[in-house]
Image (cartoon, rainbow, N blue to C red):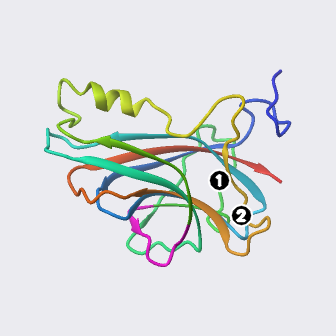
Amino acid sequence: MLAELSGHVYGSLPTYYVWSSAVTQGANKNHLTFWASSNSTGIMKIRKLFSGVLSTAAITGAGIRFDFKRCTGLTTQGGTALTPERPDTLDATLSTADYQFWTGHTSSGMVEGNIQFAQGFTNEEIGITHAADVGGLLMAGLNWMPEGSWVKDLTLRGGQGTSSGQGMTVKQISASTVGSMAWLGVVTVESS
């Protein structure tokens, strides 16, 4: 049996899917935010992050930049809370007092930290019904999180050493308002 660095057997940690569907694009909008509150005693690791364009017709789009940033002081003005799904129903339901996931909110009041990394793409004429949407299909299959056996996962420790909690947000930087996006985050939670 193989074990992770934390000592857990691979595939044994409680796992959750966070789906953010049909986020209308807009400058400075947070498309998906992961949050471990100061109440949490566990460790949340963001293992995978996928995106997709959900436009139902060909559109005239633009290049769009996303910053992947640490954050503290979560505010969710104008946003929608997301409920994580469990691929294994034996895993515990996550407490919203400990872990939260949001979409579509502004950064007003959020304390943004350093950019972990940035990524850009174009939504030019790649609606989901477009027959030649090779770029969109490729993008949907790419994990945006750095990964590999020699790379640590982006880790949110919540109540461990922070007074307000820890988060990571996917923030749209470009001003494009054309089209809509979807995001799928895969996280694990382990006790500390």
Which quarter of the figure has residue 157?
A: bottom right
Q: Left or right? Give the position of 190 relative to 116.
A: right
Quadrant, the N terminus: top right
Q: Left or right? Give the position of 191 relative to 111.
A: right
Q: Position of residue 185 (x, y in %)?
A: 52, 45
Instruction: Using the image as rendered, state which of residue 124 and residue 117 is in the foreground.
Output: 117
Answer with mark 1 or mark 2, whichever residue precedes in sequence: 1
Q: Position of residue 94 (x, y in %)?
A: 65, 56
Range covered by the magenta-colored residues = 103-112
Instruction: Using the image as rendered, state which of residue 171 and residue 16 is in the foreground.
Output: 171
The residue that label 2 is drawn on is 158
Three-letter amino acid code of the residue under disc 1: Thr
Q: Position of residue 118 (x, y in %)?
A: 46, 48
Note whether 164 is above or below 147 in the view shown: below
Q: Left or right? Give the position of 154 relative to 111.
A: right
Q: Residue drawn at (14%, 38%), measured in percent from left and top?
A: 58
How many residues crowd around disc 2 within 10 Å: few (fewer than 14), some, or many (20 or more)?
many
Three-letter amino acid code of the residue under disc 2: Gly
The residue that label 1 is drawn on is 93
